[in-house]
Image: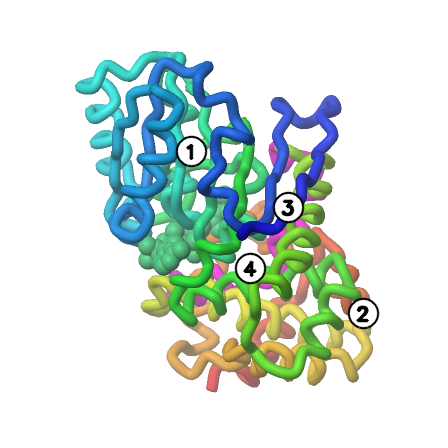
Amino acid sequence: MSQPEKRLEIPFKITVTRAWSVYLGRGLAGRIGDFVDLKAYSSLVLVTDETTDRLYGEPVAAILAQSGKKVLRFSLPVGEIAKSPESLAEGYTFLMENGVDRSALLVILGGGVPGDAGGYLAASYLRGIDYIQVPTTLLAQVDSAIGGKVGVNFGGKKNMVGSFYQPKTIIADVDFLKSLPPQEMRNGLAEILKYGLAMDKDLFERLEHKKDADFKAAELIPIIERCAALKAKVVMADETERTGARAILNFGHTIGHALEAASNLEGQHGAAVSFGMVVASRISARLGMLSASATPRIEAVLKKFGLPVHAPQVTPGELLANLKFDKKTSGGEPRWVLLAEIGRGVVNCKVPQALVSQVLAEVCR
Ligand SMILES: NC(=O)c1ccc[n+]([C@@H]2O[C@H](COP(=O)([O-])OP(=O)(O)OC[C@H]3O[C@@H](n4cnc5c(N)ncnc54)[C@H](O)[C@@H]3O)[C@@H](O)[C@H]2O)c1
């Protein structure tokens, strides 16, 4: 049945507050107890969203129950709405009403939304209880489940309230991806291409040379492994986003977030990041940092995977207005991640607004 899992060891040094490992492979969800000592906890709380609860809640709860521990189930709504103070309050109420104590373990089964909201529930309930991430979307397996950034949205802004709080372990079972809708696969692919463009030329070229846009589990495992290792490397260098090293992961996100804010792109984070990567690549080429031949290559790969390279639904003015509110601005001026070449991003770049406007005029159509 299952292939042997891969264990990506993340060395625990000074900058990471807790040791954690990523387990990656197939059939791992059936063996959660092999990766974390469930018996060491007073109770186990399975945190899902309504979709992952419907698809996998029952079998995963049964696997957890094999430990002999009490298993509780708390399900969040689907989508960004779950990353709200109201959902969080429901979570606290659920945990309190069920007498969950500090020795409990939260098992978060879902994509980045339950991962972020459930992770913050764990970080803040009783000043912090243990949790593990069992990511079920491609995006969560390559990105959001790793790194300990947890939180909720507030005042209409994304991720305004949160913490850096590492999970005990991360169990990425690619079998979950079989039920993932194509749009969610694309959201993950956009993040994978982000790693390739900003950090790993080989990874980008692997995707560039791929003939079709479909992936088998066996093909995905080495790709997820590479991304998880890249993310872990960045997190180790800058766990709490202070030195600026972690900013490399924001490649494509400066304009991406502005696009999400300016248009109704709920659930299409990958599309926004794709568009953002196009803008950042074109700016890099215009500034003479990136060779002019790189941008058509980049855009061809994005298109192959069904990701957009234009945004006809917004105007440059709308995007510029939303750029100002991005919390990654410094002194009111956005800082960009640009490319020196494919596979090498440069953080903290200033870009003249006239150039941003010029590039946006090309791609907002
Ligand atoms: N913490 C971080 O470092 C970090 C990094 C990147 C993104 N994020 C956050 O992650 C969130 C996006 O994550 P996401 O794209 O995983 O969103 P998500 O959790 O909402 O999942 C996307 C959709 O897929 C469904 N789903 C999940 N697993 C499924 C499966 N196996 N089969 C079928 N359907 C499934 C969900 O119910 C949902 O409808 C955003 O809120 C973003 O801010 C966080």
Which residue bears the numbered disc 2? 289
Residue 162: % across, % down: 43, 33
Which residue bears the numbered disc 1? 119
In front: label 1 or label 3: 3
> Of the residues shown, which amino acid type is indicated by label 1?
Gly
Q: Spatial distance from mark 2 to mark 3, Cα to Cα?
A: 43 Å
Q: What stretch is highlighted in magenta?
A: 240-262
Earlier-in-chain disc, 1 versus 3 = 3
Within-10-Å neighbours for mark 1: few <14, some 14–19, many 20+: many
Q: Do the residues labelled 2 and 4 touch (CB within 8 Å)?
A: no
Earlier-in-chain disc, 3 versus 4 = 3
Earlier-in-chain disc, 2 versus 4 = 4
The verdict on label 1 being within 8 Å of ligand 1 is yes
Tag shown at residue 254: 4
Magenta: predominant secondary structure element? helix
Where disc 1 sits, the SS reads: helix
Within-10-Å neighbours for mark 4: few <14, some 14–19, many 20+: many
The quadrant holding residue 296 is bottom right
Residue lying at 41% horizontally and 70% vertically, measured from the top left: 183
Residue 203: % across, % down: 73, 64
Residue lying at 34% horizontally and 63% vertically, measured from the top left: 266
Is residue 90 left or right of 12 when viewed as pictured? left
Where disc 3 sits, the SS reads: loop
Earlier-in-chain disc, 2 versus 3 = 3
Q: Spatial distance from mark 1 to mark 3, Cα to Cα?
A: 28 Å
